[in-house]
Amino acid sequence: MIQCKRVYDAASDSDGYRVLVDRLWPRGVKKTDLPYDEWNKDLAPSTALRKALHGEAIDFAAFSESYHQELAAHQDEGKQLAARGKKSTVTLLYAAKDTQQNHAEVLATWLRSLV
C-alpha cells in the first residue's frame, strides 16, 4: 500500500517505510526529529516545475501532466518503490499545506500504476 502523509504529522507504526519526497528539506523540522527511511529527491518535481505551480504560472492539472513526464525518466526507481509498496506499506512524506492537490498524491498515483 502506498499512502501520503505530511511531515508535520506524527509518525505511526502503520506508516511502514517512510520516504521523504520533497526536493527541499521541510521548514521548521530538524533532521534529527523526522523519522524517515529514505529521502528520494529524484522522485520530487524539478525546481522549475515546483516554482511554476507555487507561482501560479500553471494550474494543478498542468503541473500533474508535466510531473508525470518528469517521472517517466525515473521508471527504475519508481518500480522499486512500487514493488515495496505492493509487499508492505510505503508512506510518502511531503511538506505541502494542501493535502489534496500536491506532488506526493500525483507520485502515489503514478507509483500505483507501475504495479
Image: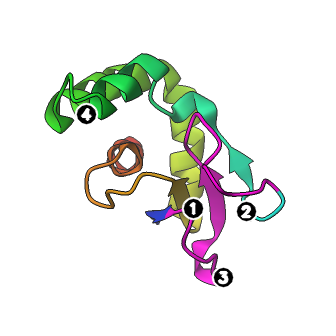
Per the rendered image, the range of residues in magenta is 6-31
Mark 2–mark 1 distance (CA, rounded to whole Å) = 7 Å
Q: Residue at x 66, y 82 (%)?
A: 13
Q: Residue at x 34, y 28 (%)?
A: 67
Determine whether the residue tagged by mark 4 lies in a helix, strand or loop. helix
Mark 1–mark 3 distance (CA, rounded to whole Å) = 15 Å
| Mark 4 touches mark 2? (CB < 8 Å) | no
Query: How far across and down, in percent of the image, does residue 44 sit?
Result: 50, 34
Q: Is residue 74 visible?
A: yes
Q: Is residue 73 part of the magenta span, yes or no?
A: no
- Residue count near mark 4 (Cα–Cα under 10 Å), binned few <14, some 14–19, many ≥20: many
Mark 2–mark 3 distance (CA, rounded to whole Å) = 14 Å
Per the rendering, the mark at residue 34 is 2
Q: Residue at x 41, y 17 (%)?
A: 48
Which of the two discs, 1 and 3, labels the residue nearer the N terminus? 1
- Residue count near mark 2 (Cα–Cα under 10 Å), binned few <14, some 14–19, many ≥20: some
Q: Check disc 2 and give the amino acid type.
A: Leu
Residue 10 versus residue 84 in the image, above or below: below
- Residue count near mark 1 (Cα–Cα under 10 Å), binned few <14, some 14–19, many ≥20: many
Residue 8 versus residue 103 in the image, above or below: below
| Mark 2 touches mark 1? (CB < 8 Å) | yes
Q: Check disc 4 and give the amino acid type.
A: Ser
Q: Check disc 3 and give the amino acid type.
A: Asp
Determine whether the residue tagged by mark 2 lies in a helix, strand or loop. loop
Q: Nearer the viewer, mark 4 or mark 1?
A: 1
